[in-house]
Each structure stands twice: as C-alpha cells, then as structure tokens.
Image: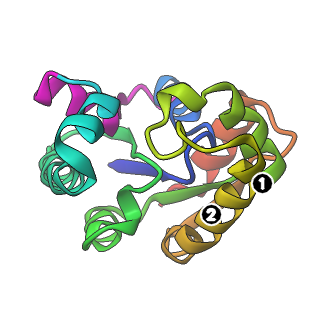
Amino acid sequence: MKIVLIGYMGSGKTTIGKELSNQLSYNFLDLDYYIEKAEGKTVTEIFKNKGEVYFRKKETEYLREVLKRNEDIVLSVGGGTPCFGTNMRLINDATPNSIYIRTDLDVLCDRLSREKEERPLISNLAPEDFQEFIAKHLFERSFFYNQAHHTVHNQGKSIMALAKEIEELLV
C-alpha cells in the first residue's frame, strides 16, 4: 500500500510521515530528499542553478519512479508537487490513500518564518510581504490539495495522534 502525504510547505508532512511509517512498519520516503540524492544537489541549489521549471520536470519524473515501486511506503511530497502537471492525478491513480495535511495560516507563517532560508520560494520575501504571500499561495494550491482522498487538520494535535488518525482513514 502507498500512502502519500500532501500539503503546504511547513505543514509537517515529513515529521508525520516518519511517525506513520513507524506505526505501520512501512518504508518512509521524502520526495525532496529523494530528488536531492538523485541529483546530487539540494532543492535550493537546483532552484538556484537550474530553475524551477527544471526542478518540476525532475520532480514529476522521480514521483512516477517512486509511485511505481512495488512496496509499502509512506511518501511525503513537496508542497508544490501536487500543483504541477498531472502530479495530483498520478498520486490519486497510484493510491486511494492521498492525505492532505491541512494547516492553519498562522501556524504555517510561524513555522516558515523560522525556516525561511531553506525554502527557495520564500527565502527572498520581505517580512512585510511574508504572510500575504503565504496566504495567497496556500489559496492557489488548495485547489489541488483538496483533491486528496482524505484531509486531516493538524491543529492542536500531537504527531502520534495525527499518525493514528491517518492510520484509521486508510483504505
């Protein structure tokens, strides 16, 4: 079985995914890390040196590769992954267990403000533009996120509780 966690950057997909994979005894894979390993560069370096278009093409290529694997896996994808090309359809066709980790705007802004330098899409934003950018970006991407088979709101829940909630949703 494949379980794919989607949601905006900073929503906790990787942290939740690791806990869920432990609870289920599945392998865990973070798509961004997989891309970094395959490309020999960080996502930030890929964005900087080759651009977002190159990154998105490679992201789709590696997503296909991972989804074709014949193994039980919890896959955490980047915040933009479902929003480009046919990626959301690829995810939903590969598994009935796509999970949108919904996170409130204020929580995202707080988390991302502390990780700003490691996030290519927000690293150059001025402080006065930060929350507006995140709000607009989240709104635009919600169309794709809401195509997931399930939604879990992570407000006020522990990582273990979220993993358990997801486990109970699995088909």
Can residue 148 be spotted in the picture? yes
Please, what is the three-letter code of the amino acid marked with disc 1? Answer: Leu
Please, what is the three-letter code of the amino acid marked with disc 2? Answer: Leu
Q: Tell me which corner region of the image, top left, top right, bottom left or bottom right, holds residue 108.
A: top right
Q: Would residue 28 be counted in the magenta stretch?
A: yes
Which secondary structure, mark 1? helix
Q: Position of residue 140 (x, y in %)?
A: 56, 73
Residue in the image at 60% along x and 44% along y: 125
Residue under label 1, please give it: 105
User: Which class describes the residues within 10 Å of circle 1: few (<14), some (14-19), or many (20+)?
Assistant: some
Q: Is residue 93 left or right of residue 116?
A: left
**Nearer to me, 158 or 14:** 14
Residue in the image at 59% along x and 71% along y: 142
Q: Position of residue 156 (x, y in %)?
A: 87, 40
Q: Would residue 111 be counted in the magenta stretch?
A: no
**Nearer to me, 65 or 97:** 65
Q: Is residue 112 left or right of residue 121?
A: right
User: Earlier along the polypeptide chain: callout 2 or callout 1?
Assistant: 1
Mark pair 2, 1: CA separation: 8 Å
- Residue 138 is tagged as 2
Q: Are marks 2 and 1 in contact (CB under 8 Å)?
A: yes
